[in-house]
Amino acid sequence: MRARPSTRPTILVVDDEPSILELLGRFAEDGGFTVVTCAGGQEALEYLKHHRTDIALVDLRMPGVDGLEVLRAIRGADPDCRTVLMSGQATIDSAVEAVKLGAIDYLTKPFDIGKLKRILTVVRDDAARLRSLLEAEQAVAKQAEFHGMIGRGAVMQDLFALIRRLAPHLRTALITGETGSGKELVARALHRAGPRHNKRFVVVNCAAVVESLFESELFGHMRGAFTGATDNRVGWFEAADGGTVFLDEIGELPMKVQAKLLRVLELGEIQRVGASEPRRVDVHVLAATNRDLLADVTAGSYRADLYYRLNVVDLRVPPLRDRPEDIPYLTAAFVQETAARIGKSVVGPTPAAAKWLAAARWDGNVRELRNVIERACLLADSEFITEHDLGRVARTRPLAAPAARAAVSSDSALSVVERDHIVEVLARVGGNKASAARILGLDRRSLYRRLELHEIGTTKRPTNL
């Protein structure tokens, strides 16, 4: 196997004849491709285990592993890869099988150089368009960012608007939502958009505090108050005086400490462990939980008076499954951030990988998506993240069966409704995409993304079989 100097995109040439490898390699290199050559099917299979390619030119008849077997491996590893089968002895049966395996064309030897040039031009232009689309999504993600959160859909825009209205006046709030949905980001946004944005923002993870140390951690202690208390200690509430305390996982607070927290909220007083006199503090208190605190109140494990005192305003952070329209922009932001940090030129997912991301369960919400994207960027060996890359790093899986991944967007009822609506609007405006985007409430980039996702207005490239 021999790789040529690095350019974009990548072409894999598989043939057991060295002269063919040299000829096609030089031609593709002159056409602006990074060229990888494999002198046989087995060598190609080994390469495909760890690398992706934008297009593969594969000889049909090779000793050992033949071209059709290589096409099967490519189809399983990377559905976005274009494949072309080559043969000096073309047959109807091999041509039909190549089409079934996703081949976009069939080249006979000696080669029609004009035809090969047209094929490579299409692949190179498609890669450039995908790169431009992904870079545009990164720009849109920046525009859609609000204090560290990204959301262009109505659900998140409503949440952002609520934060803007409440932040100047709010002293206490309860933020609810599933694990990983971004509750701390909401709390930070409330702090930054409020009058205390230049004061301390103190985070206390209640789930990580040892129960016997809760009072000391929150309110401080005096020297000699208990074994090991060798000095006076300032608690988190005193440390945040004039600013904001964020109590994450507030549902984990012990009943005894709940009563003391209520006093802080109502009177603005804390009392260090071992102290005889209370101290005044002026803090905003934001609390978050993924539990149903009202159910805990009913069960008697949580104080009703504290719950209602905290729940002056209940800000619910939606799970990622309720905002799938934001996945492309979250992905774009996470890719850009990770690529810059690790020094790689990754720009985003391939179309098949984007469908995979849109169809995944994301039980861990935005936190899980970020983790998957970061790990996929580390493993990606090109500028695009593939479906194979995602499959190697993700615990979650698409809701659709593996065999149906390529048709994910049209297999779900909601996606069918969206596709039909877009088609209807386009027909109504005579195919004018700018007008359709306005009617649909989308910018043009978002509309083009949906057209590609739903394969609207695309035609299959003709094959010469």
Image (cartoon, helix red, strand yellow):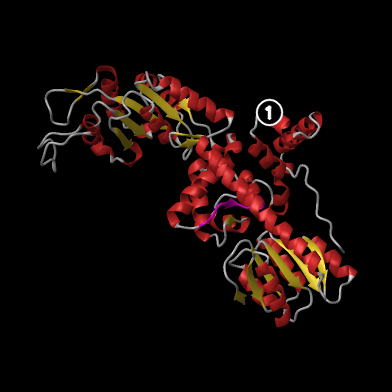
Residue under the image location 64 percent in, 45 percent down: 359
Direction from residue 428 to residue 440 in the image, left or right: left
Residue 355 in percent (x, y) is at: 65, 47
Image location (x, y in percent) of residue 26: 67, 73
Image position of 406 with respect to 382: above or below: above
Locate the C terminus by quadrant.
bottom right
Residue 58 magenta-highlighted: no
Q: Is residue 123 above or below residue 156?
A: below
Image quarter where the N terminus lies is bottom right
Span highlighted in magenta in the image: 345-352
**Residue 301 in view here:** no
Residue 349 sits inside the magenta stretch? yes
Residue position marked by numbered label 1 in the rendering: 438
Please state if 205 lies on the left or on the right of 161 as rendered: left
Q: Nearer the viewer, residue 170 or 218?
A: 170
- How far from the left and from the top, in percent, is residue 134? 59, 47
Residue 53 seen in the current view? yes
Q: Amino acid at mark 1?
A: Arg
Residue 209 figure quarter:
top left
Foreground of the two, 272 or 351: 351
Please give the name of the residue rendered at 26% of the width and 22% of the height, measured from the top-left corner: 264
Which residue is most to the right?
Answer: 92
Look at the picture and state if 70 lies above or below 171.
below
